[in-house]
Image (spheres, rainbow, N blue to C red):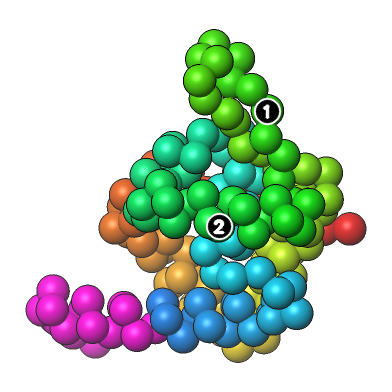
Amino acid sequence: MPPIESSPAELAVELHAVLGLLTRRARAATAGTELTASQRSVAARLLREGPATTADLARAEFVRPQSMRMTLGALEERGLIARTPHPTDGRQVLVELSAQGVDTIAGILRAKQDWLTTAIAGDLDPAQRDALAAALPVLRALAGTESTPAPAVATK
C-alpha cells in the first residue's frame, strides 16, 4: 500500500499532538522530582553541554535572561547548580551542575529513557521499531540538530 500523502499543515497538527502526548508520558515517569519543565530542561542542557553563561542558556532555551535567572535561582536553591568565574571574561559567571545536580538530572533522564525503552520494546512490533528508527533522522532534521544521536545516560 503506498504511503498516504499529508499536507504540511496536517502533519504539523498530528506531530504536535503526538509529541505533546509523548512528552507528558515521559514527564509522568519522573513526576516526583519537583522540578519544573524549564528547570529540567536547563539542567539537562548543562549535563549535555557543560558550563554556560546565563545569557547563553537563555538564548538556547528561547527565554529572556530575566526568566533564566529565576530558573537558575530555583536550581541553585536546591543545590543543583554552582556558579564559577568565567575563565576569560571577569564580568561573566559560568553556571554548571553541582555533583548533586548531575546525580539528580542523570536520574531523571535515566527514568525517562527506561520508560521509553520499555514502551518501545513492549508496545511496538519489530516493523514499527524499524519505522521509528528510520524516522529519527527526519525528526532530527526537523529539530535542527546534527544527524548524530544523543548520548544515552548510563544506567546504574
Q: Residue at x 28, y 84 (%)?
A: 14
Give the extent of the magenta segment. Answer: 1-18
Mark 2 or mark 1, earlier in chain: 2
- Residue 83 as seen in the image, left or right of residue 128: right
Q: Quadrant of the C terminus?
A: bottom right
Amino acid, disc 1: Thr
Amino acid, disc 2: Thr
User: Residue beneath label 1, please?
Assistant: 84
Q: Position of residue 21 (x, y in %)?
A: 46, 85
User: Residue beneath label 2, please?
Assistant: 71
Vertical position of residue 127 compared to residue 58: above or below: below
Count of numbered circles on the image: 2
Q: Residues within 10 Å of mark 2 (few under 14, many from 20)?
A: many
Q: Residue at x 55, y 15 (%)?
A: 90
Secondary-structure class at tag 1: strand
Q: Residue at x 43, y 38 (%)?
A: 55
Q: Quadrant of the N terminus?
A: bottom left
Q: Position of residue 91 (x, y in %)?
A: 50, 20
Magenta stretch holds residue 30: no
Secondary-structure class at tag 2: helix
